[in-house]
Image: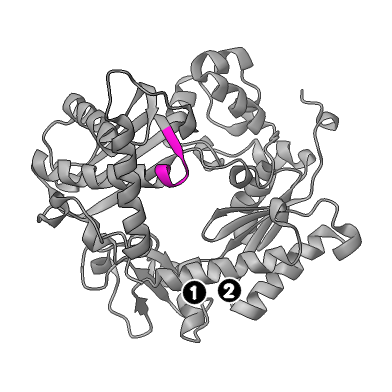
């Protein structure tokens, strides 16, 4: 049994904007997202493009939801279809954050995604009164000023607030969970992937261990979980009991933990030469962002997703190198090794590149046998400065000018879509 008296009882809430993209477009066009069937589609000119967001009526009346293809949407006079306006979505997301800043300081806010934010209302009772009423007041202000409906979950920590949101509030509008609610509200949850933080692969492993509910996870042998999952097994066990010691705002205040880039290609890439072009462009972008923050990474990851025409699948592999780097070509060389070892010549539709295990760049050592190391670093910085001043395409690698290159086209997009 867990002694909850040993853990903090904070007043954490998470606000989630309902069907955010659809709500934004409804706000822009003076529509009621609760009544009008709306779908925001990646690209209305491509029949195979997917729905990014759908309003509640769109889901209920026409069974159109996120991931539905454009050609699957019925031809109905009441349906409103829109291309995404990413710059507008970001503008409204920042407006929401500004409203939150009226109620709590910056360190009490963690922007979890473009449409979800955690806030810590602990200690605000003397300013705003009951935290539950404060959350509802914030929801009303967001709706009154931005016409964006929301749902909210609340709990003694970030995990409990998120669980209250995902498992109850998204149906009721608001839910507050306490530790006493865990046996009746959390433990019956099945499949276990319904719980925040548990993916499909972890679910399969837990199922093989005979664990099919969150309650089963809570009452599993802790040592067995740690042997199977390492430190993650300890976290899974305690999360099943509702225990979470993470601090609100910590992911922002403690700095970046990785630099990465992922993109879905506009067509199938069938040759190794084409794939290499995109990987090089992505390595350039990842390295540039790391250099701008004076950081370098030791673990380099490459992800490849195969085309549906090749029956899907793919791989995600990593390699840790001896010395941290933010050199584009060193990152690229490791990606090429990972590609050589794992790529099976199938058509590629998705690529991701990232670096983790970050270190301060000043920890990088000079090498007696690599006399050009610092010159390469200065060259990278000079290129970064040009791009920063004149735009990301002011200076590009020659491969970006080939048919396979995507950097120039994507430079005109916001969040992967037209503004």
Displayed quadrant of residue 34: bottom right
Mark 1 to mark 2 CA distance (whole Å): 7 Å
Residue named by callout 1: 24
Q: Quadrant of the N terminus?
A: top right
Residue at image point 84% right, 57% down: 124
Dot 1 alpha-carbon crowd within 10 angstroms: few under 14, some 14 to 19, many 20 or more: many
Query: Where 325 falls versus 210 (above or below)?
Result: below
Task: Indicate yes or no whether the magenta region holds residue 103.
Answer: no
Q: Which sits in the foreground, 170 or 212?
A: 170
Q: Residue at x 33, y 38 (%)?
A: 377
Does any portion of residue 221 appear in the rendered image?
no
In this rendering, the answer to whether 357 lies above or below 417 is above
User: Would you place residue 333 above or below residue 176 in this image?
Assistant: above
Identity of the residue drawn at 20% across and 31% down: 336
Q: Is residue 100 left or right of residue 265?
A: right
Left or right relative to 288: residue 98? right
Query: Mark 1 or mark 2, which has the lower sequence index?
Result: 1
Q: Is residue 117 visible?
A: yes
Which quadrant of the structure image shows residue 335?
A: top left
Q: Is residue 147 above or below residue 122?
A: below
- The residue furthest right is 126
170 and 251: which is toward the camera? 251
Residue at 43% x, 70% y is 87
Measured as percent of width and height from the top left, residue 72 is found at 26, 66
Q: Which residues are magenta?
A: 290-296
Front residue (pair 185, 333): 333
What residue is shown with label 2? 148
């Amino acid at each position: 049994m867990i002694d909850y008296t040993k853990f903090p009882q904070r007043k954490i809430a998470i606000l989630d904007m309902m069907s955010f993209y659809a709500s934004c477009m409804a706000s822009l066009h003076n529509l009621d997202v609760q009544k009008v069937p709306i779908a925001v589609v990646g690209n209305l000119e491509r029949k195979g493009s997917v729905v990014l967001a759908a309003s509640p009526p769109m889901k209920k009346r026409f069974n159109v939801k996120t991931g539905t293809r454009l050609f699957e949407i019925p031809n109905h006079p009441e349906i409103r279809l829109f291309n995404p306006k990413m710059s507008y979505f970001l503008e409204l997301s920042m407006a929401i954050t500004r409203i939150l800043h009226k109620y709590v300081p910056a360190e009490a806010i963690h922007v979890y995604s473009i449409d979800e934010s955690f806030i810590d209302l602990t200690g605000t009772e003397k300013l705003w009164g009951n935290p539950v009423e404060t959350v509802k007041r914030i929801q009303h202000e967001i709706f009154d000023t931005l016409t964006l409906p929301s749902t909210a979950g609340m709990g003694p920590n970030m995990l409990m607030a998120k669980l209250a949101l995902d498992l109850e509030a998204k149906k009721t509008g608001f839910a507050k969970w306490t530790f006493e609610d865990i046996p009746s509200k959390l433990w019956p949850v099945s499949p276990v992937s319904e719980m925040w933080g548990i993916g499909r692969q972890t679910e399969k492993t837990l199922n093989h261990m005979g664990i099919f509910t969150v309650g089963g996870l809570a009452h599993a042998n802790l040592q067995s979980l740690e042997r199977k999952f390492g430190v993650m097994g300890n976290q899974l066990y305690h999360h099943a009991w509702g225990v979470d010691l993470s601090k609100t705002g910590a992911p922002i205040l403690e700095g970046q933990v990785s630099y990465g880039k992922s993109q879905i290609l506009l067509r199938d890439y069938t040759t190794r030469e084409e794939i290499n072009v995109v990987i090089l462009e992505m390595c350039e972008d990842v390295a540039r962002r790391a250099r701008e923050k004076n950081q370098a990474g030791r673990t380099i990851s490459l992800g490849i997703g195969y085309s549906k025409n090749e029956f899907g699948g793919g791989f995600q592999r990593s390699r840790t190198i001896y010395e941290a780097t933010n050199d584009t070509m060193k990152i690229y060389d490791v990606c090429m090794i990972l590609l050589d070892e794992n790529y099976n010549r199938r058509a590629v539709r998705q690529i991701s590149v990232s670096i983790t295990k970050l270190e301060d760049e000043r920890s990088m050592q000079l090498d007696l046998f690599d006399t050009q190391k610092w010159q390469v670093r200065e060259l990278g910085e000079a290129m970064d400065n040009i791009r920063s001043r004149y735009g990301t395409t002011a200076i590009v690698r020659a491969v970006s000018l080939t048919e396979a290159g995507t950097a120039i086209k994507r430079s005109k997009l916001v969040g992967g879509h037209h503004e």
